[in-house]
Amino acid sequence: MARIMDGRRLAEEIKEKVKADVEKLRQSGIDVGLALLEVGDISASRQYYLATLKACKRVGITAYQYNLSGDVSTNEILNVVHEINSDARINGLLVLFPLPKRVNSRRVVNEILPEKDVDGLGSISVGRLAADESTFQIFKEGHYDQIYDGRQIPAISSYLPCTPFGVIRLLEHHNIKIKGKHAVVIGKSLAVGKPLSLMLLAKEATVTVCHKATPDMGYFTKQADILCTATGVSSLIKGDMVKESAVVVDIGINVLEDGRIVGDVDYEAVKEKASFITPVPGGVVPVTIAMLIENTVRSAQRDEFLKNPFMVG
Ligand SMILES: NC(=O)c1ccc[n+]([C@@H]2O[C@H](COP(=O)([O-])OP(=O)(O)OC[C@H]3O[C@@H](n4cnc5c(N)ncnc54)[C@H](OP(=O)(O)O)[C@@H]3O)[C@@H](O)[C@H]2O)c1
């Protein structure tokens, strides 16, 4: 029977630390700000939007809400991004997806200054992750603590995408060894699967990435010491697709017809075989939000440090 990886508890711990950092900055006269940019009425991301607002309030980060109408032009969205880029009160920008189909999402995301790209999805942030220039942030040994006490702050030139960053933090929190393990990631999106595979690779796992065109996916999943799935397909991962004692991280979010929220994994069957498993809800999502606000406070600390190295640390 698997041990449950409780994301809510870890998220609370992270938020407590962020709250202390926010308070420390406030004592130096700095308010930490996060902008949320929503275009049209996006029911798919409403819960995430509301949960992020709640988390900001909990830790003392000021949320700046930009709710644009669904028929706004791409240029108008870019203007808002520029406005946020040059607003000294705002340390990070979260763009809620999906944007309307006619808007080129990549163009919008790439317009965010890397130092405010706290969702880590701009091409510079993704490139720095791929080039191992930002992965020091996922190493607990000797790094988390140094980041917390300010010594690593100047080295952060870009932020890690929040969901895969949260997955790594969940694994580390439960002392799950990644180095030398076979990690199988299902899904190759830019927001989740791809950056997660890069992070697992940076931590020296042997990584296999599966997607829609992967034939006989069970062949690969059965070899996984660590199995991470992010597809949005409920019950994709059945009990017989998982190795005995595997660590299973379910990133998927699926709303069933009866209103229940489930992941990609057949939870009841898989929890009998796995050594660790994330629940849905209550697994990865709370940690994702915690990482977003942690990235935001790091951005504020870095900004403050670079302008006045004697104030932080
Ligand atoms: N927990 C969190 O904090 C969090 C954050 C973001 C997203 N999510 C959830 O995670 C899921 C994925 O999100 P996303 O943004 O990555 O979605 P996405 O952009 O739609 O990507 C889904 C990925 O899953 C693959 N896939 C879909 N069906 C598959 C199948 N039957 N077999 C194998 N692979 C399959 C797709 O393969 P192809 O590339 O071949 O099409 C694609 O790479 C969603 O449920 C989303 O709600 C959770």
Image (tube, rainbow, N blue to C red):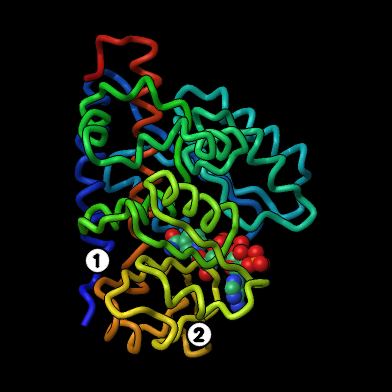
Q: Amino acid at mark 1?
A: Asp
What residue is rendered at 42% in x and 44% in y? 202
Q: Closest to the observer: 82 or 185?
A: 185
The image position of residue 12, as x and y in percent, is 22, 53
The residue carrying pointer 2 sits among few (fewer than 14), some (14 to 19) or many (20 or more) residues within 10 Å by Cα, namely few
State left or right for residue 153 relative to residue 188.
left
The image position of residue 166, as x and y in percent, is 36, 53
Q: Which residue is mark 2?
A: 256
The image position of residue 294, as x and y in percent, is 34, 40
Q: Secondary structure at mark 1?
A: loop
Image quarter in which the N terminus is found: bottom left
Q: Closest to the observer: 304 or 165?
A: 165
Number of numbered labels in the structure image:
2
Q: Secondary structure at mark 2?
A: loop
Distance from mark 1 CB to nearest ligand 1 atom below 8 Å: no
Q: Which mark is residue 6?
A: 1
Residues under labels 1 and 2: Cα distance? Answer: 22 Å
Dot 1 and dot 2 residues touching (CB under 8 Å):
no
Image quarter in which the C terminus is found: top left
The quarter of the image that holds ligand 1 is bottom right
Q: Relative to 36, is 268 above or below?
A: below
State left or right for residue 150 relative to residue 199.
left
User: Which of the two discs, 1 and 2, labels the residue nearer the N terminus?
Assistant: 1
Q: Is residue 46 visible?
A: no
What residue is rendered at 36% in x and 34% in y? 136
What residue is rendered at 77% in x and 37% in y? 75
